[in-house]
Image (spheres, helix red, strand yellow):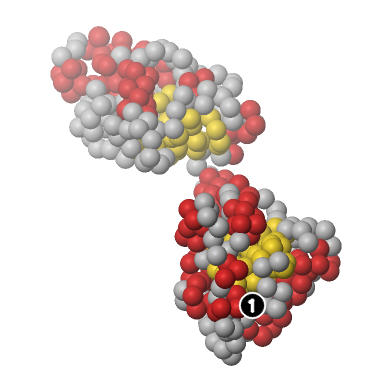
Amino acid sequence: MGEPSLKTLLENLPVFWSEVDEPWQTGEGDADWPWPAGESHADGLADPGGSQRAPDRQQWGAGLAVPRGYAAFADLVDLAPAAAFIRDRDGRYLWANHAYAHLYGTVPQQLVGRYIEDFDASAEADRFRALDQQILARGAPVRHTLRYLRQDGTTGRAVGRRFPVREQSRTCVAGIYVDITDHLRATEQRQQAEENLSALRDHSGLPCALLSANGRVIEASVAAADLFHLGLTDLVGRRAHTLLAPEPGPDLDRLHRRWNGLIARRTRRVETTAVLVDTHGLQRRAELHLTTIGHSASRARHVWAVITHQSLAHEAHPPLTAAQIRILSLLAQGSSNSDIAASLKLSRQTLDYHLSRLRHLLGAATRPALVARAYVLGILAPHTWPPRSATAAHPLSTA
């Protein structure tokens, strides 16, 4: 390989992933190319075969000697993962690296001196020759994408450049390509996963949101926006703490501790409850499922929040005491006033005061109405027996 060819190959060697995502074009005169831009086929896609027309190695080998001082760079090109080749205007290989030879399931020594037709079907060989002639006529490099047949029978994609080089005082064609098949497949799989997640988020009917580590809403479902009586664009970008009832208490403290545990990756998934507040000031208790995303970072960067159960929206009322919640639990269990007073060691007058106070706070006139309101307002936990507080730290707790 001569010094000019080596320099040209090195100049065209870097093909970055940022270029993979750009729209590739074949340059000026696209209509004159043998096939549409981005739909060409790679050299080296069919199994080796065809006629053996290798010339005497003495006729071409001397011209590809590596100049002194460039041996290290020649090794770099020869062992680079990008597939590279040099052909003369007759379609004969003058040089190829290991990555290019691997496309044919062979080694460079078996490629050099042979022709395109020795490795590719005649129709593809004609296209490759036509492209070589276009580059020789224009005298300028071309960037493009191409499709090829992989050894496993699937279609692959590659990006690269084909350009003129000088070898043995004559102009030849060189090419260098990077296989992006796996990159594109991974990108398509990621896009499909994102589409599936978006469909689940938007059509499941569950209020859910993706939160950053500092609690800002990154994306959300329409159901989540409806829950807070907000437009979707108004919900995205908000801080999550503005959606919680502002009164401090054990619920909020517990939520903060569990959130910090998620971000610090002490746990990956948390189920808890919180009191949400909408733009009208109405509150509702909701069951939250918080799950971190990814495993790489020492601290979680994103958390999915999903609301599975929610109480009836209501005006804010003073928090109930532990005794009042215990009375509601016993009422829901079917206990009589005498049994409740005995269980809590209260006088009948004190119990009557608590019941009167509960009827006022919850807007319920009878014992059955008190129990029903306790459930729809999220005071008592659904799906549990015996009845217990929705904020109880343990399933068996009744406080």
Q: Position of residue 240 (x, y in %)?
A: 49, 24
Asked whether 141 or 274 is in front, the reply is 141
Residue 387 vertical placement versus 91 (above, below): above
Q: Residue at x 60, y 47 (%)?
A: 18
Q: Position of residue 293 (x, y in %)?
A: 42, 40
Residue 164 vertical placement versus 217 (above, below): below
Query: Mark 1 — residue?
Result: 92
Q: Residue at x 55, y 65 (%)?
A: 65
Q: Residue at x 53, y 83 (%)?
A: 48
Q: Position of residue 160 (x, y in %)?
A: 63, 59
Q: Residue at x 54, y 61 (%)?
A: 66
Q: Secondary structure beneath disc 1?
A: loop
Image quadrant occupied by the N terminus: bottom right
Q: Is residue 198 visible?
A: yes
Classed neighbour count for the residue bearing mark 1: other residues with Cα under 10 Å, few (<14), some (14–19), many (≥20): many
Image quadrant occupied by the C terminus: top left
The residue lying furthest to the bottom in this view is 51
Which of the 4 image quarters holds residue 50? Answer: bottom right
Asked whether 383 or 78 is in front, the reply is 78
Asked whether 106 or 224 is in front, the reply is 106
Direction from residue 346 to residue 229 in the image, left or right: right
Q: Is residue 329 visible?
A: no
Asked whether 367 or 15 is in front, the reply is 15
Q: Position of residue 125 (x, y in %)?
A: 67, 80
Kind of residue at disc 1: Arg
Direction from residue 269 to residue 161 in the image, left or right: right
Q: How many discs mark residues in the rendered view?
A: 1
